[in-house]
Image (tube, grey):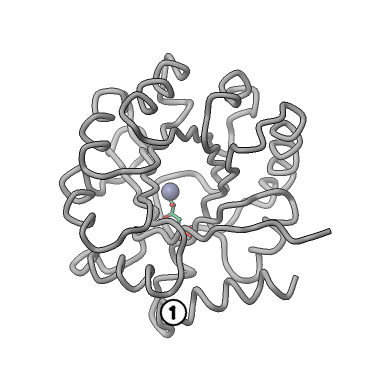
Amino acid sequence: MTKPEVKLAPSVLSADFSRLGEAVREATEAGADYIHIDIMDGHFVPNLTVGPPMVAALRPWTKLPFDVHLMMSEPDRYLEAFARAGSNIITVHAEACVHLHRSVQAIKALGARAGVAINPASPLSLIEEVLAEADLVLLMSVNPGFGGQSFIPASLDKITRLRRMLDESRCLGTELEVDGGINAELASAVVKHGARVLVAGNAVFHKGESVAQAVARLRASLDKA
Ligand code: DX5
Ligand code: ZN
């Protein structure tokens, strides 16, 4: 069987916030596929990050798609601002959307690709009815809010079940992204269970290794598998 194409989406949450533009450029030059930008509102998750102005400020630093992960309550209020700022994929949490189908349609109407995310404690049934509409499904493998947490082992079985749901419902164009605690030791297992986009924060942006070396190590771990 040929190996599936796997995309890497470095999360700049773990980068030095005083030089985020350079971090985006480094990830681009290292061969990333998407730039993952984590938006936190201090309400849906117990942490705060950045908003549309930062997405707009980072836009000139790369041509790669911005994969914008909204960990916020009532994301509908900000979809237009994030789209205007240059987000290519906008992902909302199922737990934060009363009308998830409407949110997905709103993202698409703004010309972006629509992602739906679910937390570790949420059942896959929460997103089942919108799978056919979604361009991307983001499965959280840590509780959202912070970089550098440990991968929750039960996520592997959940990835398998989500992969099966996508395949059985013929959602072949829907990307399965996994986010949280992924490193070079875990990456191939995550892919074997069915992931096709890997988010990596701490494994890419950390002291002791350049971004290029870290991305190369992640890729090598997938090639070896
Ligand atoms: C966590 C964020 C993740 C985070 C991943 O709430 O959604 O994108 O940055 O970072 P690592 O790879 O360090 O777990
Ligand atoms: Zn994220």
Question: Hey, which quadrant is residue 225 in on the image?
Answer: bottom right
Seen in the picture, residue 38 relative to 15 is either above or below; the reply is above
Q: Quadrant of residue 63?
A: bottom left
Q: On screen, 188 above or below 194?
A: below
- Vertical placement of residue 160 versus 54, above or below: above
Query: Residue farthest to the bottom?
Result: 208
Is 64 in front, or is 192? 64
Q: Quadrant of the N terminus?
A: bottom right
Q: In percent of the image, x 24 and y 65: which residue is there? A: 20
x, y percent for residue 113: 42, 36
In the rendered image of this protein, does residue 194 appear above or below residue 29? Answer: above
Q: Position of residue 44 (x, y in %)?
A: 36, 33
Identity of the residue drawn at 38% across and 74% down: 29
The verdict on label 1 being within 8 Å of ligand 1 is no
For badge 1, the amino acid type reads: Ala
Residue 201 is situated, as x and y percent measured from the top left of the image, at 44, 62
Choose between 200 and 136: the one closer to the eye.
Answer: 136
Label 1 crowd (10 A; few <14 / some 14-19 / many >=20): some
Label 1: which secondary element: helix
Q: Nearer the viewer, residue 212 or 110?
A: 110
Q: Residue at x 59, y 37 (%)?
A: 174
The residue where tag 1 is placed is 212
Task: Please indicate whether residue 117 sits to the left or right of residue 211 in the image.
Answer: right
Q: Is residue 170 left or right of residue 37?
A: right
- Residue at the spot 31% in from the left edge and 46% down from the top edge: 47
